[in-house]
């Protein structure tokens, strides 16, 4: 399996309501993309300084799943309409995750 972790830094003018709308849209999107085995998107807890403002974690079976998720029309619409106006920078990384790791994600609070 592959985990796709994306971190966002927002513009200085981003309003809390815009972040809430992005999180709500991404959360509602996840069940509609069958390739997603796990998905979570949320603002940073700000436990440590200098982190990103927001992150998303998507887990899929393979590279084709990454493409299906990222290219899905609903994801593209959210990226274009809700994320693009507030994102100053975006960084993504993909890495392997095993079944045990996925199980731990599913049971995490």
Image: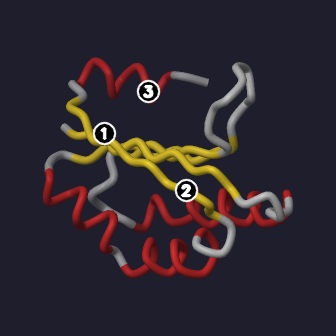
Q: Which quadrant of the rendered structure holds the C terminus?
A: top right
Disc 3 secondary structure class? helix
In the image, is 44 to the left or to the right of 98?
Answer: right
Residue at position x 45%, y 47% in the image: 6
* Real-space CA distance between mark 1 and mark 3, rounded to the nearest whole angstrom: 11 Å
**Location of residue 95 by image quarter:** top left
Q: What percent of the width, then of the height, locates residue 43? A: 69, 43
Q: What percent of the width, then of the height, locates residue 77? A: 50, 81
Residue at position x 44%, y 48% in the image: 91
Q: Which mark is first along the chain, 2 or 1?
A: 1
Q: Which mark is first along the chain, 3 or 1?
A: 1
Given contact means CB atoms under 8 Å apart, are the residues at marks 1 and 3 in contact?
no
Q: Which residue is mark 3?
A: 105
Q: Which residue is mark 2?
A: 89
98 is higher (above) or lower (below) than 78: above
76 is higher (above) or lower (below) than 91: below
* For discs 2 and 3, the disc positioned in front in the rendered view: 2
Q: Which residue is mark 1?
A: 3
Q: Which mark is first along the chain, 3 or 2?
A: 2
Instruction: Please rate how many residues cluster around mark 3, counting C-alpha atoms within 10 Å: few if below 14, some from 14 to 19, many from 20.
Output: some
């Amino acid at each position: 399996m592959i985990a796709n972790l994306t971190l966002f830094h927002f513009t200085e003018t981003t309003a809390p309501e815009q972040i809430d709308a992005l999180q709500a849209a991404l959360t509602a999107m996840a069940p509609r993309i069958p390739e997603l085995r796990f998905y979570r998107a949320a603002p940073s807890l700000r436990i440590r300084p200098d982190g990103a403002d927001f992150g998303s974690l998507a887990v899929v079976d393979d590279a084709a799943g990454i493409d299906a998720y990222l290219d899905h029309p609903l994801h593209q619409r959210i990226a274009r309409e809700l994320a693009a106006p507030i994102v100053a920078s975006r960084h993504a990384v993909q890495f392997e995750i095993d079944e045990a790791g996925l199980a731990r994600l599913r049971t995490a609070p």
